[in-house]
Amino acid sequence: MPPPVFRFAPSPNGYLHLGHACSALLNFDLARAAGGRFLLRIEDIDATRCRPEFEAAIYQDLGWLGLTWETPVRRQSEHFDAYREAVEKLRASGLIYPSFESRTEIARLVAQQQSAALWPHDPDGAPLYPGDAKSLSPEERKRLISSGVPYALRLDMTAACAQAKDLGWTELGEGLDGERGAVTARPEDWGDVILARKETPTSYHLSVVIDDALQGVTDVVRGSDLFWSTSVHRLLQSLLGLPQPLYRHHPLMTDASGQKLSKSTGAMALRELRAAGATPADIRERVQLP
Ligand code: GLU
């Protein structure tokens, strides 16, 4: 049996905090305990938010924590062709269509619905796509695209679910409501998700699935905020003929008021804790890892 493969996949759009340390250390420890491999992946598809100094800080902070990882590190921004190829495959199966509404227009379309207050939202809290771009004629699509307006490439969720039925995964950790063991995927909860945009030929969901497959990841260990994203990941794996990893979602680190740690809620960065005299052992203790 080849050794299991774990990965920590941060986005360099801010400094790492205790929540990241928890995820990185857990992946590293599990890989070690299983005689497996540990990979680091830089999820930098969003050129407007990712910065080289944050990436440099990731290497520095993880090194300080005592982690080692295989090189070269995969940086998603260097692999747009792989993601384009996957989008093309889905498009050839008739599962992708372009939509042209901005976020503001989407909010307006939702507000116009008779049942606006009951309009469904995805697990991340965004309203499901309310537009009718799926029924635009090929000529109209061509005309809009060549006019230069921004667009998003969406997955036709109804058609996709018809092609990939009865999906699920093995959860070794726990979802936000304590789900564990054999979990049934609910990709339809996400509506027609965006898989790529005019200016970025991929999305979080698509690149994570492609990379986990290309890197041979067998065990996805990450925070439980991504638990229901796994539904979309399982759907894409099925549509693209990719292997299914095991999943282990871990509880999120929270602050004193029970809020998920994040830069926006003022979580202290690892580098600030280090500057204030914390040691790697202190960090392990704070994230409750031996
Ligand atoms: N890049 C994602 C994040 O920073 C994690 C992706 C994953 O582990 O699937 O939240």
Image (cartoon, rainbow, N blue to C red):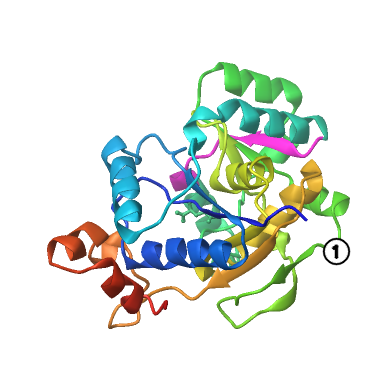
| Residue 190 picture location, percent across and down | 64, 58
- The three-letter amino acid code for the residue at tag 1 is Asp
Give the SS element for disc 1: loop
Q: Is residue 30 visible?
A: yes
Q: Look at mark 1 in the image and give the residue it sits on.
A: 166
| Residue 201 picture location, percent across and down | 56, 31
Quadrant of the image containing the C terminus = bottom left
| Residue 248 picture location, percent across and down | 61, 69
Q: In this rendering, is residue 272 above or below 199? A: below
**Residue pictured at 61% horizontal, 51% vertical:** 129
Which of 117/37 is in front?
37
**Residue pictured at 68% horizontal, 46% vertical:** 216
In the image, taking residue 199 as reference, residue 214 lies left or right, namely: right
Which of 185/249 is in front?
249
In the image, taking residue 166 as reference, residue 15 lies left or right, namely: left
Whether residue 99 appears in magenta in the rendering, the answer is yes
Whether residue 27 appears in magenta in the rendering, the answer is no
In the image, taking residue 217 as reference, residue 258 lies left or right, namely: left
Q: In this rendering, is residue 98 above or below 220? A: above
